[in-house]
């Protein structure tokens, strides 16, 4: 089981940019596909995007396509979520997750290890 810790969230205004980081430990990070999810108040957790073990390909939800970018630095055991042109609707707790081999990680399934979450608040 890999341990994940998110950081970099905060309070921003609409149109601003923010980068979240997810640091991994306790597992073979370079072998995991990684994903980002978010959960807004009163809503179910939703898939934001995912990235393969090597850094490509990447996949994104329609709601963030073109604005968010996922990247990873395997030597640093870190995955990033770059969020540009943030909107009020992006306000949520953001979670980093790791997927086991053989899962449908590209569709948002098979993520077994989760971070504690990191709040992103966007004012309108």
Image (cartoon, helix red, strand yellow):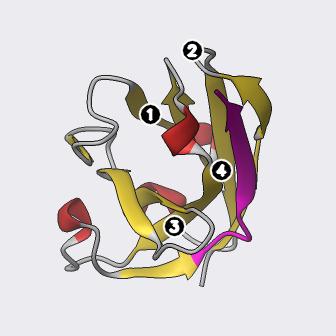
Circle 2 — which element? loop
Where is residue 56 drawn, in percent x and y? 24, 38
From mark 1 to mark 4, how far is it between C-alphas?
Answer: 11 Å
Q: Of the numbered discs in the image, which one, if any, rests on residue 15?
A: 2
Q: Is residue 48 above or below residue 42?
A: above
> Nearer the observer, disc 2 or disc 4?
2
Pointer 2 local density, CA inside 10 Å: few below 14, some 14–19, many at least 20: some
Q: Quadrant of the C terminus?
A: top right
Q: Of the numbered discs in the image, which one, if any, rests on residue 50?
A: none
Q: Residue at x 63, y 15 (%)?
A: 16
> Magenta part of the protein: which range?
114-124
Q: Is residue 71 above or below residue 104?
A: above
| 118 in magenta | yes
Q: Which residue is mark 4?
A: 22
Pointer 3 local density, CA inside 10 Å: few below 14, some 14–19, many at least 20: many
First-in-chain label (4 vs 3): 4
User: Which of the 4 image quarters holds residue 105?
Assistant: bottom left
| 122 in magenta | yes
Left or right of 92 on screen, residue 69: left
Left or right of 123 on screen, residue 36: left
């Amino acid at each position: 089981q890999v341990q994940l810790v998110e950081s970099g969230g905060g309070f921003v205004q609409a149109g601003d940019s923010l980068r979240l980081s997810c640091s991994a430990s306790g597992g073979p990070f370079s072998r995991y596909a990684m994903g980002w999810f978010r959960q807004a108040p009163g809503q179910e957790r939703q898939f934001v995007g995912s990235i393969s073990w090597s850094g490509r390909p990447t996949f994104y939800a329609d709601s963030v396509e073109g604005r968010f970018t996922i990247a990873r630095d395997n030597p640093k055991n870190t995955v990033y979520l770059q969020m540009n042109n943030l909107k009020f609707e992006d306000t949520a707790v953001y979670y980093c997750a790791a997927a086991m081999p053989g899962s449908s990680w590209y569709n948002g399934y098979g993520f077994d290890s989760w971070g504690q979450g990191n709040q992103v608040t966007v004012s309108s």
